Image: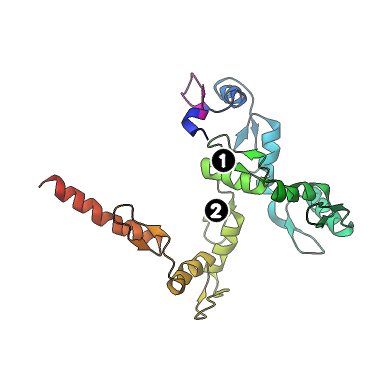
Amino acid sequence: MLKHSEEKQFHCGECSKSFSREGDLKMHLQTHSDAKFIPCCHCDQKFLLEEKYKKHLLVHDEGGDLACPICGKNFKYESRLKTHVKSHNSENVFACRECNKSFAQKRHLITHLRTHSGEQPFQCTECNKRFSLRENYMRHLRSHSGEKPFACETCGKRFAIKANLQNHVWTHSDQKPHVCRVCSKQFAEKNSLTRHLRIHDGDKPYVCSDCNKRFTRRDHLKLHLQTHVGKRSAAAFT
């Protein structure tokens, strides 16, 4: 497999940014021209292509006040809610030939088939990472853009992933829904429970690259790495 630096052979003469595909470079060059951008009506982002703008709107469609009367899932736009409700009223007529699982909508079958074929049609133009699911692709794009569209109504803290916001909301209540299966200790946030379970499991996923010492938490590894920095500084004067 080629490295990213070798793949990005198309270079912008205006800002030195590089791309792996000529089409991406051409689209980027428009940012240096007088091309008209499409502004998002929900946030400050702007888009050159209508297709990319429509994909971006899906980010803002998560959550909302319009609830499905059957399963309770929430939507911001009535059109999306209507499409969703139809999935409950339809028979599962689209069947997978590999595992006989069936779906009410053809697009759900198409997405499912990728679990068998390994197809990953969504590719990040920044790092070339590929995804089989659009929602995973959209979440990944935010790691490059820094976009955090989900805000806590209590403290204003923002998140790139809706699930992280939902997890954070528990910290403002007295409820601790995440319970340790070993000692029954309760936590408000799921990631706190995950860290705690490493104590019982003996899992130490964070490894020091200098001495191979292992840690259960990333912040403990960062503190440990400082001891090597001090040793290097002292050695420089000996």
Residue 107 numbered mark, or none: none
Using the rendered view, name the quadrant where residue 163 is placed: bottom right
Q: Main secondary structure of the magenta part?
A: loop
Q: Amino acid at mark 1?
A: Lys
Q: Amino acid at mark 2?
A: Phe
| Residue situated in front as seen by the camera: 161 or 172 | 161
Left or right: residue 118 versus residue 154 is right
Q: CA distance from mark 2 to mark 1?
A: 22 Å
Q: Crowding near pointer 1: few (<14 within 10 Å), some, many (20+)?
A: few
Using the rendered view, name the quadrant where residue 222 is placed: bottom left
Q: Is residue 10 magenta?
A: yes
What's the magenta region?
Answer: 7-18
Q: Which residue is under mark 2?
A: 159
In percent of width and height, residue 1 lies at 53, 35
In percent of width and height, residue 44 lies at 58, 39
Is residue 82 visible in this depiction of the protein?
yes
Vertical arrangement, residue 7 with respect to residue 210, above or below: above
Q: Crowding near pointer 2: few (<14 within 10 Å), some, many (20+)?
A: some
Vertical arrangement, residue 126 with respect to residue 195, above or below: above
In percent of width and height, residue 34 lies at 59, 20
Is residue 41 visible in this depiction of the protein?
no
Secondary element under disc 2, as helix, strand or loop, is: strand
Q: Which residue is under mark 1?
A: 129
Marks 2 and 1, the one that precedes in the sequence: 1
Using the rendered view, name the quadrant where residue 66 is placed: bottom right
In percent of width and height, residue 101 lies at 80, 57
| Residue situated in front as seen by the camera: 98 or 132 | 98
Left or right: residue 66 versus residue 146 is right
Left or right: residue 22 versus residue 65 is left
| Residue situated in front as seen by the camera: 108 or 54 | 108
